[in-house]
Amino acid sequence: MKTTDHTVPSAFQINERLAYLRERRNELARSHKRDLYCDNAEFLIYHWSGKAETFAAATGENAASEDERINVGDHTCRIDVGGPFPYADQMPSKVEGYEATVTNWAKDYAYFLRHSEAEVHPHEQIVGEYHWQLDEARHYKFPDSHARLGLKARELGAGGFSLAHTCPDLSIGLELGWCGLLEKVRSNRKRLCQHGDEQGVSYLDASEQIILAIIDFIQRHSDKAAQLAEQTDDPELKKSYQTTAEVCAHIAESRPSTYHEALQFIYLYMICERINGHGNGYGRFDLLLNRFYQHDKAEGLIDRDRARELMAEWYLKYGPHLSYGGRLQDGSDATNEMSWIGLEAYDMVGGYNQFGVMWHTDIDPDFWRYSCDVVGRHGCGVPALVNYDVIHASELRSGYKPEDAWNVSYSGCQWYCGVGREYQDQDVNCVVLISPMQRAINLAIEKNVSHWTPFWDIYCHEVDRTCDALVDFKNEAYKHHAQLWPEMVCSLMMHGPIEKGRDMTDFGAVDYNFVSVNALGVPNVVDSLYAIKSAVFENKKFTLEQVRDACARDWTGDGEEAMRLSLLNLPKFGNDEDGVDAMAVQVSEQLREVLESKRNIKGGNFRPSLFQYMGHTVAGPYLGATPDGRKKSEPLAHGMNPMHGRNKNGMTATANSFCKLDFAKYQGGSMQIELHPSYFPEHVARGALVDNFATAFMLKGGVQINLNVFDLEELRDAYEHPEKTEYDDIVVKVTGYSAHFTKMDRQFQKEFVERVNYGSLED
């Protein structure tokens, strides 16, 4: 079938080794061994739950029951082997006693890593896997004071947790190696000891234990590969195992000196870091790797084909959030040969991946055109197309120094981060704007409000209350975070923590400490407030009480379906209609102003992101029907994208609505596009059409495009007939991440196929 065949034409053909590894990747996905679960729908909506505070990789210390868990897709590098961590009962905190201290945490982490198997599979030359996360074996729960504030925040429409959503600077590790990092820890510990900083000394003692465990973990991969080389008579396998043994032995003892070693260093670091928590980005790979590649090429150790092959294998192991492109510190284009190799490698193997290409007005036009060609041909949202100039301006606006802001990287679903200098508490905090809107309606009825302006004032006050509850909740978490669940592996690759003897989550450890807050239901609130303003306050067609009560009955009372259709047929966001789009600006700006007025106890402010992970899919029944005409059984709008089916004036009109917002003031707001294959005439290159639209969007100030190319009717067939195996390998960009369509929870599949399937710019 045309749109399910994503083995698209590419100039780069994979060899037999990569074909074998690609099939292994696909089979792991088909068998649900790479799935990521969320504990319950409440967590998806609020990013916090009274029952659990993290994503659950499988079963374990904090995971929910099988009946509660929701499969959000297969976009984690973890491989499920079934059952809990087998040595959990012998964890130091279980045997010696649990304490919320860095020392106690580090003992558990080192034990966990030393009891994690080093795995080397046939034909691999980039090795490393993990099967459990530490929170499945170690107690992870904040004090009751935090839970009480969390329940209050959730009641008012907010929530969040803090874990693994930042961007380490991998150049620190690539420059020093693990032994160099160990020496850096020891020398700074000596200095802090001389200054009587007992807390800093304790932290660096713990950091030393973690580094030693990581070195041991890497060396065990070398030993395993050497053992396998001895056991095989196959000359190709023997050579492959020997290469792996040599690479791992070198990076266990010294800093990486070759391109292959750099890739392996990064991958094993990522494994060690992801055991602690899922979510970080990994920076600008073209800038990180180009010097290794250029050195090896000059020495005759590698050519572009081999570099591409190794990068493709890296993607087959796992494709985390990283970026290519952007600008250098002097403002010039950062595109280099490694940028091309990274994109070509994906073109070879396709499938799910999370990287982005950062556009700017001076980007190499050939590289940008090729990026657009790749996303158009593969059709599953890879790469994400990101506006570097906007995200750079956003970081400057947030208070970044120019010498730091240039090194910003696309780092997650819709978010970006200054590399190595920011504790970016991003993507896992949320304001559910529908909640303060519903309270405002009730209060306005009680006060017999008859005009729009006092109603808007009440709404603004309720948004402020919600944000205050979030601030209190987050600040309580920050009081305990650095001791209860430090992010010590990530801190090793940050500027400040080792020097100061403080975890990156602690006070004063890094230069920038912002809290970014996802906003759920913004387009629904925009459409609802516009409907209230027009139909209730201006035209007096309905009373506010009638609208509220009809929503409470889900539009089932006498005459309420006619009321619903009347409200539904009013102008809606996403159609380039100035009136309702002005409401979108007003609602978004009000939220931004409120959040930016708040400070966290680390000194940074709160920043809104016009995005939400997946809560829009499940929130309808929890929040009820809304005055925009939405029934409670329907999902909410995805991020800042128009509510499903409401953008009727075409893709260009939707883009124009988007770009009436100044995205330099927000921390992301991706435009999600599902293109029908008919959008691309056979005689026109897909890249040219994507380039034309994407460049125009970026020039108007858009910040990100996630672009799928599918016939949603075929995906609907996949949803209705899950037994059809021909759909097993379909990959889609869901929100900010890619996943196999048929492996997600069915309610996510259903929401996806209800989106608008554009066939042209005008559709």
Image (cartoon, grey):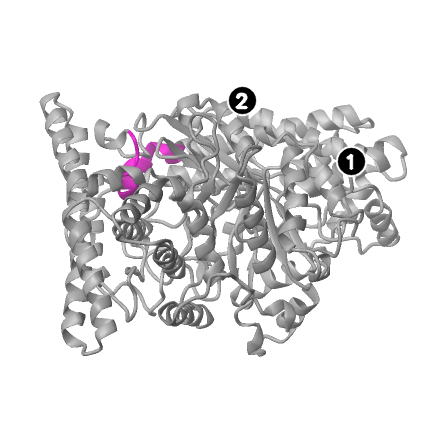
Q: Which mark is residue 115?
A: none
Q: Position of residue 153 (x, y in %)?
A: 51, 38
Q: Is residue 625 above or below residue 22?
A: above
Q: Position of residue 231 (x, y in %)?
A: 15, 76
Of mark 1 and mark 2, the one earlier in the sequence is 1
Pointer 2: what residue? Answer: 597
Q: Nearer the viewer, residue 431 or 233?
A: 233
Helix, strand or loop: magenta stretch:
helix
How packed mark 1 is, by other alpha carbons closer than 10 Å (few <14, some 14-19, many 20 or more), is many
Q: Residues at badges 1 and 2 in contact (C-beta under 8 Å)?
A: no
Question: Which of the two discs, 1 and 2, sits closer to the camera?
Answer: 1
Q: Magenta stretch? A: 476-495
Answer whether residue 224 is magenta in the image: no
Q: Which mark is residue 580?
A: 1
Q: Label 1 amino acid?
A: Val
Q: Label 2 amino acid?
A: Ser
Q: Nearer the viewer, residue 234 or 131?
A: 234
Q: Position of residue 123 (x, y in %)?
A: 30, 69
Circle 2 — which element? loop
Residue drawn where x is 54% and y is 31% of the image: 389
